Image: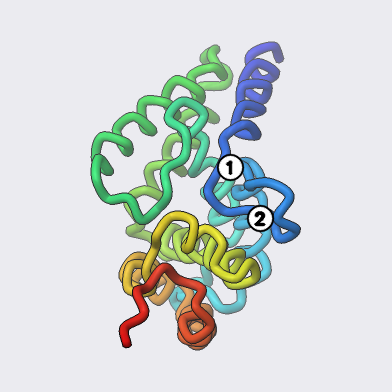
Amino acid sequence: MQNIVNFILELDKLKSVTRKTSLLNGERYENSAEHSWQIAMLASSLAPYAAGDATKPVDINRVIAMLLVHDIGEIDTGDTIVYQEEGLADRKLAEQQAVARIFGLLGSAEHKPHAEELMTLWLEFERAETAEARFAHAADRAMPVLLNLANKGQSWIENGIRYEQVIKKIKPPIQAGCPALWDYLEVELDAAREKGYFDDEISD
């Protein structure tokens, strides 16, 4: 029991990992724990639109489990805006080492299968090779976009993010995991560009 308590209390640190997107009321930036909860709810709500096999629907419970563990490594590494490509391989390695440490807190042989399953879920998300992982990626990429659309491009403008950067980064994973969601976002992003929600240079 103590190992489980230690593990769960360690996860509390995720509440202190600040992201670049603010809450809708602009009061503060969201944290990674809030992000994980919100994308799990987003995926659950979007389940009928998941791009799965018609003969084998996406396992939404597995998707939600992936989304709840996918950012746990940020307890050690912190969060980096998704558009920063430099050093990506090193960050991913550091995150994997972090989740191995954190899942290892479950400790005893009795809890080893659970720790291994959590690591399996984390790796499945990272590899994005299953329908569940692709749908999880779609939700993960979409949520900051939805917040930015509602916040008039807050983090895009603050961090100098251009329209083309957003499209390049989010279109492939969202289109692969949830095509209907991309169809919706494509229209909204075009409208946001017209409203000046990106850090695009305006030519004469």
Say left or right for 34 vs 51. right
Q: Residues within 10 Å of mark 2 (few under 14, many from 20)?
A: some
Q: Is residue 136 above or below residue 125?
A: below
Q: Residue furthest front?
A: 204
Q: Is residue 147 above or below residue 8?
A: below
| Cβ atoms under marks 2 and 1 closer than 8 Å | no
- The one of 164 and 60 positioned closer to us in this rendering: 164
Residue drawn at x 38%, y 43% is 123
Q: Quadrant of the C terminus?
A: bottom left
Q: Earlier in the sequence, mark 2 or mark 1?
A: 1
Q: Position of residue 138 (x, y in %)?
A: 47, 66
Residue drawn at x 50%, y 23% is 102
Q: Position of residue 143 (x, y in %)?
A: 57, 62
Say left or right for 150 vs 198. right
Residue drawn at x 47%, y 62% is 156
In the rendered image, which residue does mark 2 sit on? Answer: 38
Q: Amino acid at mark 2?
A: Gln
In the rendered image, which residue does mark 1 sit on? Answer: 32
